[in-house]
Amino acid sequence: MIDPVSLFMAATTAFNTVKNLIQAGREVEDVLGQIGTWMGKVSELNALDNKKPSIFKRIGGGKSIEQEAMEQLQRREAVRKQHLEMMSMVKLRYGPQAFDELMQMQRQIKLKREREIIHQQHRRQELAMYVIAAILVAAGVWAIWGIVVTAIDWKQNGVN
């Protein structure tokens, strides 16, 4: 798992690459892959900030609450500034509706993935229930078989 600082540095590197390529005269179309990389790193960073810690990991990583809050605020503000700059670059090239359309697509993809995650969780629960049911049926059949075999054995040996 990547720590927030490394993830933030990766996002900043992707952003600076986009910025340098555009300043060097490259078209926005040529750097869309880098923009996607930046957005991916920002998404990972947001997920990491909201992630629950492992039961074995030290809470806070040895940092004070104030230090952790300041680092998180600093990262969020830097990402917000990068986002605004990226938004203006896309809007300048494709028009004002382009970035709004991009954000709408992101929301749709996020909703679709959330639905898929929920569906996948339901399927896992169903599978677990089927496995448990199969184990219970097998145990029941085994118990009945044991009773039948014991009854036959007692009958043959004359035990009432």
Image: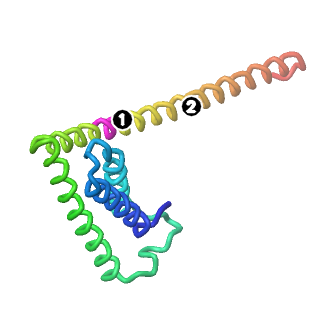
Counting residues from the N terminus, which is met first, the one under dot 1 or under dot 2?
1
Reply yes or no: does residue 3 show up in magenta.
no
Whole-percent x, y for residue 112 in the image: 30, 35
Choose top left, top right, bottom left or bottom right for residue 104.
top left
Of 9 and 133, which appears nearest the observer? 9
Would residue 7 be visible to someone looking at this image?
A: yes
Report the residue at 45% width, 36% height from top. 125
Query: Circles 1 and 2: CB distance less than 8 Å?
Result: no
Image disc number at residue 116? 1
- Please name the amino acid that badge 2 sits on: Val
Q: Residue at x 60, y 25 (%)?
A: 137
Residue situated furthest left in the rendering: 96
Q: Is residue 47 visible?
A: no
Residue hosting label 2: 131
Which range is magenta? 112-116
* Residue 110 pos. (x, y %): 28, 42
Q: Amino acid at mark 1?
A: Glu
Q: Position of residue 46 (x, y in %)?
A: 32, 59
Image-quadrant location for residue 114: top left
Structural distance between the alpha carbons of marks 1 and 2: 22 Å
Pointer 1 local density, CA inside 10 Å: few below 14, some 14–19, many at least 20 = few
Image height of 14 relative to 73, above or below? above
Residue 113 part of the magenta-drawn span: yes
